[in-house]
Image (cartoon, rainbow, N blue to C red):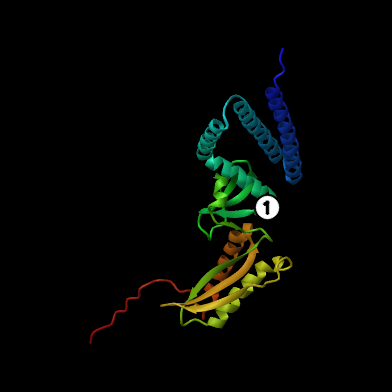
Amino acid sequence: MEFNVGLAFAIITFLLMMVFLELLVRRIRVVLLKKAKNKKQISNIKFLTRMINIAVFLFIFLFIFLSYFQSWTGIGVFLGLLTAGLGFALQRPITGVAAWLMMTIKRPFSIGDRIIIGDVRGDVYDITLTHIYLDEVGAGISSGEVTGRNIMVPNYLFFEQNIINYTLTNDFVLSSMDVSITYESDLDKAIEIIEKVANKYISELKEKHKEAPYTRVSMADSSMIISLKFFVPARQMMEVKSKITKEVYDLIKKEKNVEIAYPHTEVVFRNKK
């Protein structure tokens, strides 16, 4: 039986490339597993590296097989068409996997962070190869209540949308509330009441964030607007804001020199002589 040098060379080349591939993928898997924080992420990493092994194995096998039995020109045309077809069909899934790798390595956000991706806002509770899973937070920017709905955001949007992370460096965000009072009201007294109430509820948080509540005043068509600004943990924003609003309202209602402004019409009757 005649020894086929070309076939032996093809087989040896195939084996060497597979060994190199296995070592490379194993190294990547080790690096990613060190960054994994839960069982699901570990499972995703193993699944990804397994799929890479299979895909590259098929690619190398086809390449060597066709190079042995066909011309290089035919191989080039075939691989070009194959790559273009796969690239077009799997564009978003591949981009999603690339985004997952970026999120795993760079950590722009982690499990538990409150983020906005495009027009979606929520708390991250899982990150997979294809999707980011969020516990939805109220759609309005001023609302911080969890709705109970879960949102699956495709990973490829990571490269297409602006991402806002509420809790990247710390849990505090700037919140505000406006109180409108009439022009006849005692402005200084109203500010005193608002700042006193705010300090009462924010005082326990000052140790973690040194910025104290403060006010800003502006004029509107039919009222003075006192804007209270305060830093509060993102997940407590609506709770603290609600408590401050109620107590400010109760205290102002007791004051004779401070009146809350609201749209209304007064009708005055005059007796004709």
Query: Between residues 90 and 114, which one lies in front from this camera angle?
Result: 90
Decide which of 141, 17 is in the foreground and name it.
Answer: 17
Q: Residue furthest front?
A: 2
Q: Residue 33 placed where, x, y %?
A: 74, 42
Q: Can I make out residue 166 in this image? A: yes
Tell which of 128 and 52 is nearer to you: 52
Q: Residue at x 73, y 34 (%)?
A: 22
Q: Quadrant of residue 31?
A: top right
Say what secondary structure mark 1 lies in: loop
Location of mark 1 (residue): 107
Q: Is residue 260 above or below residue 51?
A: below
Q: Would residue 222 be found to the left or right of residue 77 on screen?
A: left
For badge 1, the amino acid type reads Arg
Q: Residue lying farthest bottom?
A: 273
Residue 131 in view (yes/no): no
The one of 270 and 11 positioned closer to us in this rendering: 11
Left or right of residue 236, residue 73 in this image: left
Please say if 226 is above or below 157: below
Q: Position of residue 259 (x, y in %)?
A: 49, 76
Q: Give the residue displayed 75% in from the left and 32% down from the top.
A: 19
Spot occupied by residue 18 in the image (x, y as percentages of width and height): 71, 31
